[in-house]
Structures are given as structure tokens and as C-alpha cells.
Image: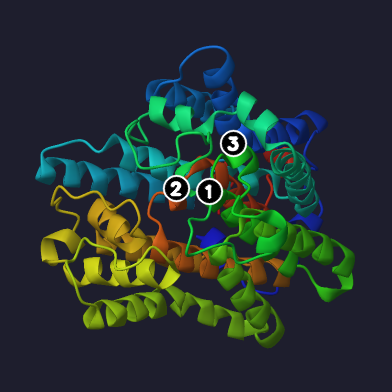
Amino acid sequence: MSYLAATPGAAPVSSLPGMAQPAGYEQKLIIAILLACIGYQAMLCLLNTLVMPVSRTFIGASELVILLACIPLLAKRLLPGTIILACLIAGVLCLLTLVNGQLNAKAFRDLLIPLIFFWAGCNLGSIAIADNVLKAAIAMVSALGLCELLFLDTYTNFFDIFSYYVNTGNLQPITDYVRDSKLQLNGTRPEGIGRTFLPGLLGSHRVSSVFLEPVSLGNFAVLCAAWGMSKPFSQWRNMMFFVGSAVFLMVLSDSRFAMASLSLMVVVRILLHGPLLNTALLTPFLALAGLLYLGSIATGPVFEMSSDDFHGRLEFSGKVLMDFDLNSLLGISNGVIYADVGYAHLFNTYSLPLCLIFWACFWLLPITDSISQRFRALAAIYLSLLLCISGFSFFALKSAALLWFLLGSSLQLPATSTQIASGAPRHD
């Protein structure tokens, strides 16, 4: 398929004759959808606080509405590669369902997000639209984040985050957490650990903004930085805006993951160019090797974290992976849920062979220019590092939708005006 065989460095397809610019309503629709993905949890929390309790079922229904809103964008062009991959995924998951004797509906839902939003990004195919989406998201996140920082009591009167997570089944109502706080459990740094950034000025509070938890705000900051650093130095104003916004949000959320990711991305942006960026293909394998090493030298029970810091979480991930057997690697369920161990969650849910197919498809994407080449490499670093410490964040709608839309947009492969008018699929 030519869609998988495009050569790096080729002229962006959007610059070729016959390519239609997205209509005004399409631009508004995709911006609204992406902002809904980022902020829907905040809206549901507001509803839970002021109107009525929100259940996990209500959250699922809200996500379904958002995904269905993408249909007008997806129907414009069929991507054969995406459809083939979706069928392969469905087949493997059905096989695992038969072997395990239970249907894992979440596994299907989680993979819909990257497929749908990558498809949507490809259908629009505009760097300008991606810029506008991200700038609008940064404005929304920063505004509510500053309100939370400066007017915390007022913010939590409208967004009772702790109660929201209890009602949706993500927290137990009986906990050792400080009862007079309405933030998430990780909304403050405990004594003995403290903030990394500006502790004297910001205290122990970690801002979460529309994401309701600071971890997700840190992930959003990394995506902003990756998009900014994918731009050429000639567009230094745009680059500095996105990277500067990322640093600002990283400080607000006190995200150590964001600090580590941004530091590595800066090194890659400065040192690696052209074909050398393809070495990012190795990042998950290097990450796994590091985790296995930490697991091999760690002491204590497998499912017990030695310390709740960055090193402790990496060590914990390594111990869990060291405990894996062949059945776990093949996705034959062992009944364990790996919420904070990303690689273990992927292998146990989708099987190692299917994960390798995912990664191969990621690196067979048609790179059209240096922007998409850099963004793919930086996204690979983000995903590889994220899986070291988190399993579910990889598929969280509030961050995954944006990532895959940006990746699809960076390829700049929109439908032609003829295809839009006729509804004919593009044979790529």
C-alpha cells in the first residue's frame, strides 16, 4: 500500500494540487471535539458537584458521544491501512476473549481512541488546524489552572474532585487522605517528598486544571513540548510558545515525569536529525531493558512498591515484569490488573505479538517532511517513558485523543477534493 510506503522527506501532500482545505465547519467541529476530550472530565465533575452524582456508566456514555461526533470527519475518507489494523485487532481480541473466557470491553474501547483520532487527523491533515487546537487547549487549561492555583477554595466548591472520583468508583470513600481537601489523592505532595518546582512559592499543592489530576496535566505539558519541538527553528516563535507553555504547566502540576521527558526531548531535538531520528524506534526496548535491570536487583515482594517516588515506581514496574510468564506475554489473563505498570498492562491485555505489530505500524507511517519525522520520534519517547510508570494513562481520552490527532495531522495527508465530493475511498 502506498500509504505505508511514502518516503521520508517527500513534499507534504497538502501542498499538492487538488487537495481541499478543510471547511470552516470541519475546523470548528474538530476543535470542539478535541476540547471536549480534554475537558469532559471537568464538566462531569462540575455536574457531580452541583447537580447530581455521576456514575462510571455516565462517563462511558459521554465518551461514546464524543467518539460518535467524529463520524462526519471519518466518513470523508477510508484509510485501508487503518481498517486492516482495526480488523486485525478485533480478531486478536476476540481470540483472547475465547481463550480467557471473558470479554474485555475496555480493551476494545481503549484502541478505538488512537484509531479514531489518528484517522481524524489524517482526514484534516492540517498543521495549522493542529496548532489552533493546541493553542485553544493551552488557553483553556492555563485559565482554569490559574483559577485553581489562586482561588483554590472557590475552585473546589465547583469541582469537588475527591467526591467525583469516589462516586465514579475510582477511590474508596474510607482513606487515610486528608479529609478537608477536595483534591485528588495526588493533588498535594506529602510531607517528606515535597514539590520539585518552586516549593516556597506554591507550597504542596499540585495544579490539575481541567484534567482533575496533576499527572494528566503533566502528560499534556509533554505533548505541548513535543509538538513545539517538532517545528523547524525558522518557526522559533511557535516553538517557544508551545515549549514555554509546557514548562509553565509542568511547574504548575509539579510533574517529575514531564521534567524527565522534556529534558530527553531537548537532547534529541538538538542532537538527532534526519535518519538518526529513527533511532527512537528503540526507545521502548531500551526502557524495558532498564526496567528489567531494576527489577532484577530490587528486593521485597513483587507487588509492593519500595517507595512512592519516581525511582520506586520504575523499580516496581521492573519487579512486575520479572514476574511475567509466557501466558502473561501472550495475553492469557492471570486475573491481575496492572494500572500503574504500562508495559505489563499492554502485554497482559493485548499480547506481546500484537504490541509488536502496533509498534511496527507506528514506524511504517508515511513521513512527509521533517516535522512529522521529529514529532513521531518525540511521541515515541513520550509513549515509551509513560509506559514505564502508567498503564491506563496511555489510553486516557483526555490526552490520547490529542496525541493521535496531532500525529495524524503531522502527516499532512488529507482527502482530495474529488474524494470529498464523491465519497470515494483513497487507495493508499
Closer to the chain start, of discs 1 and 3, is 3
Helix, strand or loop under label 1: helix
- Is 56 rendered above or below residue 278? above
Label 2: how many Cα within 10 Å (few below 14, some 14–19, many 20+): some
Label disc, if present, on residue 395 of the rendered structure? 2
Residue 387: image quadrant is: bottom left
CA gap between label 1 and label 3 equals 9 Å
In the image, taking residue 415 as reference, residue 131 lies left or right, namely right
| Residue, disc 3 | 37
Q: Amino acid at mark 2?
A: Phe
Q: Position of residue 163 (x, y in %)?
A: 46, 27
CA gap between label 2 and label 3 equals 12 Å
Q: Position of residue 70 (x, y in %)?
A: 59, 32
| Residue 76 in sight from this viewpoint | no
| Residue, disc 1 | 400
CA gap between label 1 and label 2 equals 6 Å
